[in-house]
Structure formats: C-alpha cells, structure tokens
Amino acid sequence: MTKLNFAIIGLVALATACGEGPEPQTIPETTQDQEPTDPVETEVWTPVPDKVDPFGQNGAPSDAIVLFDGSNLDQWISATDSTAAKWIINPDSSMTVANGTGDIQTKDNFGSVQLHVEWRSSPENIASGQAKSNSGVYLQNRYEVQVLDNNDNPTYVNGMVGSLYKQSPPLVMASVPTGSWNTYDIIYHAPEFDAEGAMVIAPKITVLHNGILIQDNFSLQGTTEYIGWPKVNAHGPGPIKLQDHNDHSGVSYRNIWVRPLN
C-alpha cells in the first residue's frame, strides 16, 4: 500500500470521527411482499371470463361476427364505390371472385381481431407466377395476407402464399393441393399512433395456415405496397377486404368470421 493510500484512509477516518463524510452504508428495507405460503394467496377468482361455445352459429364461435356463411353478401360492399358486392355465390355456400368487379370489403370497421377465412384456388387456373389464383386478405384495408396457388408455381417468396405481402415470407409453405380448401386463422393487433401521427406501436400479425404457424407475431413496417416501401399513415379502425386481382383468378371463399379483440 502506498503512502497516498494511507493518507486517504486517514482522512476518511478523521472525517468520520468528526461527524463529516459519507453516512455509513445500510442495507435498504425490501419492498417486496413476503412470498406466500398458502396457495389461496395466489388464487384469482374474478372477473370470470365469458363462456364461449366454440362451435356456435354455422360452426363459428358463439361470440363471433359471421361475415359470410354462404347465404348472402349482406356484410360486404364494393371497395370501389360502396355499392352492393357483386361476387358470385355458389351452390356449395362459397363465393367466387367475379373478375373485374373489384375488391369487396366489410360494411363494418374493425381494429384488433381474430379472423377465420377459408379459401380455395381454382383448378381451372393454369396461369403461372402471380397470376395463378391470386387474391388477398387485407386487415384494416391496408395490410395484406397473400392468397396464391404456389403448388408447382414458384414466385418471389415475400409475395408467395401466406406472405405478408412484400414484407415477410411465410415460415413454411402449408398449402393443400390445388382446388382443396385452405384455412387462414389470423390474429391481428392494430397499430397505435401518437398525437403527431407517428406510429408508436406497429401492427402485428400471426397467421396459421391449415393449422400450421406461418407468421409469428410479425411487426409490419407499414402498408403492404406492390411498388415502393411500406407507408405509415395514422388511421383508426378499418374494413376487412378481399382482393379481386383482376386476372380471372377464380379464387373462392367460405366460412368467414371475426372476433374483435378488446
């Protein structure tokens, strides 16, 4: 130990003896409650969750809003001019894109949702690339989950079936054979914006394709654009939209329901 160290120690000792210098260190009292010793102390009884029949109206959960059950298009309008939706209702309780009539969207607007959609590619569509049974499911009219027949039909992976268009390829390709019915179960959490319109919480999407996780709580950068980078524009609730790709895609939909998430 050097003479300097001895000097410092001596000064600290003198200051302490004279009532000056730092207070002696003490261990602070803990603010954490004592760990429970009785299991009752960690039981929560209220509020009791609502009871939901998972197989309610037309197979949808009892608290779901049925958007399409095959009987009519009453929940849908043209995304172009808000007139009645013009897609084709089929005898098997599905609907098919009527080429050239435009996208359709829900009359109601939604925020965060659980969305169930069943869709079928057309066996008659023998096109390739992005023209083979192309459609899309849009959340809040801005964020697209791609619908496409990629069976023996390669394309850019951030535009393939199950992609969040131009932003996130699917984790796996889980499509059934062409002409069979696919299922999308989508969990969507809407974005939040500050007073100046800046996005402070990004929209997040989880997608199960035929029961297989293909998008895992992905944070979107903004809108899913065909050309250019994602755009961020402050918005509130918006419609769910189904795309008419305007290339005789022949895509059909059935059994569509939604559960708003509070």
Image (cartoon, rainbow, N blue to C red):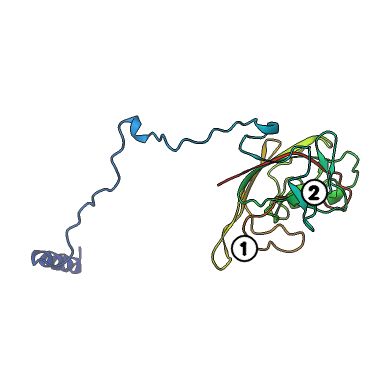
**How far from the left and from the top, in percent, is residue 12?**
15, 66
Q: Secondary structure at mark 1?
A: loop
Residue kind at label 1, given as amino acid type:
Ala
Q: Provide the residue designation for mark 1.
A: 234
**How far from the left and from the top, in percent, is residue 142?**
70, 56
Q: 21 and 132: which one is in front? A: 132
- Badge 1: residue crowd in 10 Å (few <14, some 14–19, many ≥20): some
Q: Closer to the observer: label 2 or label 1?
A: 1
First in residue order: circle 2 vs circle 1? 2
Q: Provide the residue designation for mark 2.
A: 135
Is 77 left, or right, of 7 in this rendering? Answer: right
Q: Quarter of the image holding residue 199? A: bottom right
Residue kind at label 2, given as amino acid type:
Ser
Q: Are marks 2 and 1 in contact (CB under 8 Å)?
A: no
Picture layout, residue 70 above or below residue 139: above
Q: Which mark is residue 136?
A: none
- Badge 2: residue crowd in 10 Å (few <14, some 14–19, many ≥20): many
Q: 247 and 68: which one is in front? A: 68
Q: 120 and 82: which one is in front? A: 82
Q: Secondary structure at mark 2?
A: strand
